Image (cartoon, rainbow, N blue to C red):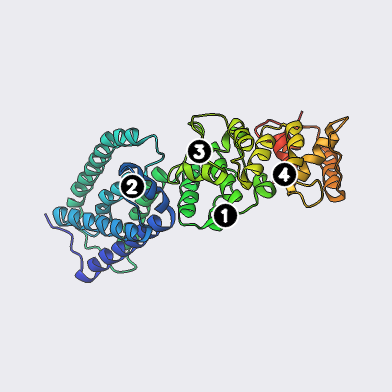
Amino acid sequence: MTRKRYGNDGTTAVKTVCAIVFCLFTFIYLYCYQGSVLAVAQNHLSHGATRYDHLVGALLITFVAWLVQRGVQFVMRLSDRLYAFGFFPSVLLLTMLCDYRSSDVASHYLRVWTWLAPLSFLAWWGLLSMLRQAEEYDSRVLPASLFSRSMWVSLLLLGLQFLFLGGMTGGDDNFHYRARIEAELMKGRVEEAARVGKRSMVSSPSLTMLRAYTLSLQGRLGDELFRYPVSNGSDALLPTNAHASCLLLPADSIYHHLGGKPAHEMTVLTYLKLLRRTGHASKAAADYELCAHLLNRNLQSFVRLLPRYYAINDSLPRHYREALVLYVHQTSSPLIVYHENAIDTDYDDLQKLERTYPDAAARSLAVYKQYFGTYWWYYFYAGKTGRP
């Protein structure tokens, strides 16, 4: 049977372009998107014995993935029409490396890939075998130049494999944000850490804890905490339970920032009160305790505590002023009477806006568009179907 014939220049072009596209995509994907995840994976799997370098790691993994492809091509001698299929073992390897999700799933991660990797490889082998058999019946001489059909089909096949990689490894925004924030904090890049996921509505207790710590390092906790989506309740502020935990950052660094690590597990508010009563609380602990009450929607406790740390005037952090205005509007005999024209006007406008929308869902959306980032939106709407 007559075999297909391809010009050497065309075949070289297909191989060269595919290799360049694969290496560029792999390096950019690893360095720009998956670097922090790989740092977490290496840290956990090595039990903290080694550190991951984003640039060196991306270069090394890209090179190894390319070598795997070269080995597949050497063994299988794929034609240029099927050449792009030879990258799948490398893509599968990258998928396994980048699929690590969190610190408590190492055994699950290994257990899943113990059967999923061989199954994926066998599926690829079976498909490739069928395509090679079908190729035996096609004796056409196909061009394989830079702009030929073979080139575009090869690039399409590569793109489908990249989609497989992205689909298997890129869906957990919460984990990616946590890993990136902690990686930036480990480098001392606090401003960069504060920008991670700021435009996203993704949140979790651990992400709230990291955002609070980052803002506290900048002295902006009372001004900006509620500009992020945050989890309900004060227990999200510290790594005191299984719901809020660190991936890379030592949890002790957060406790030392506040005044010291607790001798045993306790709630966030109990810990912060203990720091205050024993005189070990740092300046940052004051804002943590105040924000803990705000997260619990406990305005009475917040108002009782506020004069301990701040003079009641217009220099208060933004969220504290919003909470005071809300407190005055909700309390018949307030302990503190506070008014500020701009804040009072904003709150009055919020109430007018709410009265404009009888439907709870429409009202919630309208308030979100104009008032997300205020304490009022958190107090009335965060984690709720709507304001009663």
Q: Measure how far apart labels 4 and 1 are at the Cα level.
A: 28 Å
Q: Measure how far apart labels 2 and 1 are at the Cα level.
A: 25 Å
| Closer-to-camera residue (295/231) | 295
Q: How many marks?
A: 4
Name the element at disc 4: helix
Q: Position of residue 372 (x, y in %)?
A: 70, 44
Q: Can you identify the residue that label 3 sits on? A: 261
Q: Amino acid at mark 2?
A: Gln
Q: Earlier in the sequence, mark 4 or mark 2?
A: 2
Q: Amino acid at mark 3?
A: Lys
Q: Measure how far apart labels 4 and 3 are at the Cα level.
A: 22 Å
Query: Given this view, does label 4 or label 1 mark the residue nearer the observer?
Result: 4
Do the residues bearing badges 3 and 1 touch, measured as CB atoms within 8 Å?
A: no
Name the element at disc 2: helix
Label number found at residue 195: 1
Query: Given this view, does label 3 or label 2 mark the residue nearer the observer?
Result: 3
Label number found at residue 309: 4
Q: Earlier in the sequence, mark 3 or mark 2?
A: 2
Residue drawn at point x = 49 percent, y = 53 percent: 185
Mark 4 nearby-residue class (10 Å; few <14, some 14–19, many ≥20): few
Q: Measure how far apart labels 3 and 1 are at the Cα level.
A: 28 Å
Q: Amino acid at mark 1?
A: Arg
Q: Earlier in the sequence, mark 4 or mark 1?
A: 1
Q: Seen from this angle, which residue lies furthest bottom?
A: 9
Name the side, left or right, on which 53 lies relative to 299. left
Do the residues bearing badges 3 and 2 touch, measured as CB atoms within 8 Å?
A: no
Query: Given this view, does label 3 or label 1 mark the residue nearer the observer?
Result: 3
Q: Seen from this angle, which residue lies furthest front?
A: 278
Q: Earlier in the sequence, mark 2 or mark 1?
A: 2
Q: Measure how far apart labels 3 and 2 are at the Cα level.
A: 26 Å
Q: Quarter of the image containing the N terminus?
A: bottom left
